[in-house]
Amino acid sequence: MFKIQKVYKIQIELDGALISATLDDNPTVRDFITHLPMTLELKDYASTEKIGFLPDKLTTQNAPPGSIPSVGDISYYAPWGNLAIFYKDFAYSQYLVRLGRISSGIEHLNFSGEKYATISLIHSN
């Protein structure tokens, strides 16, 4: 018997522009979606990713020890408790938990300074 994976789709709204993403099915993602909708301030970090600090830390139960992020990945960096949305590839990062991947609209991450992003769950099965 196999377990059917749930599919979670989110939308990130930045100044009227929409970014769509599909999230994985793992304990960290399931914890994350219980906080949606949420609004975060996104800012650039290391010219590689946009980060925003979550109001509460997420579970990392059964999470791998780290991951290698690539363009479009949405991740959770456990030590800081922040969301990380990668617009450039990066090296292996310990304590980085992949949440999912952007399916459209990544070009809207090309901004300087800070922007508020509203993240909403738009579908789950």
Image (cartoon, rainbow, N blue to C red):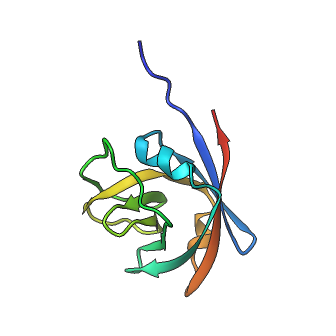
Residue 66 at x, y = what percent? 27, 54
Q: Which residue in the rendered view is the most extreme toward the right? A: 16
Residue 76 at x, y = what percent? 41, 59
Would residue 18 be found to the left or right of residue 33 on screen?
right
Would residue 98 be found to the left or right of residue 114 on screen?
left
**The image quarter in which residue 36 lies:** bottom right
Residue located 57% across and 55% down the image: 35
Foreground residue among 41 and 50? 41
Foreground residue among 3 and 60? 60
Q: Is residue 2 above or below residue 27?
A: above
Q: Is residue 104 above or below residue 51?
A: above
Q: Is residue 7 above or below residue 58?
A: above
**Quarter placement of the N terminus:** top left
Q: How many marks?
A: 0
Foreground residue among 72 and 57? 57
Residue located 47% across and 43% down the image: 24
Residue 123 at x, y = what percent? 67, 42
Residue located 47% across and 39% down the image: 25
Residue 43 shows up from this direction: yes
Residue located 34% across and 61% down the image: 78
Residue 118 at x, y = what percent? 66, 66
Would residue 97 be found to the left or right of residue 21 on screen?
left
Foreground residue among 119 and 48? 119
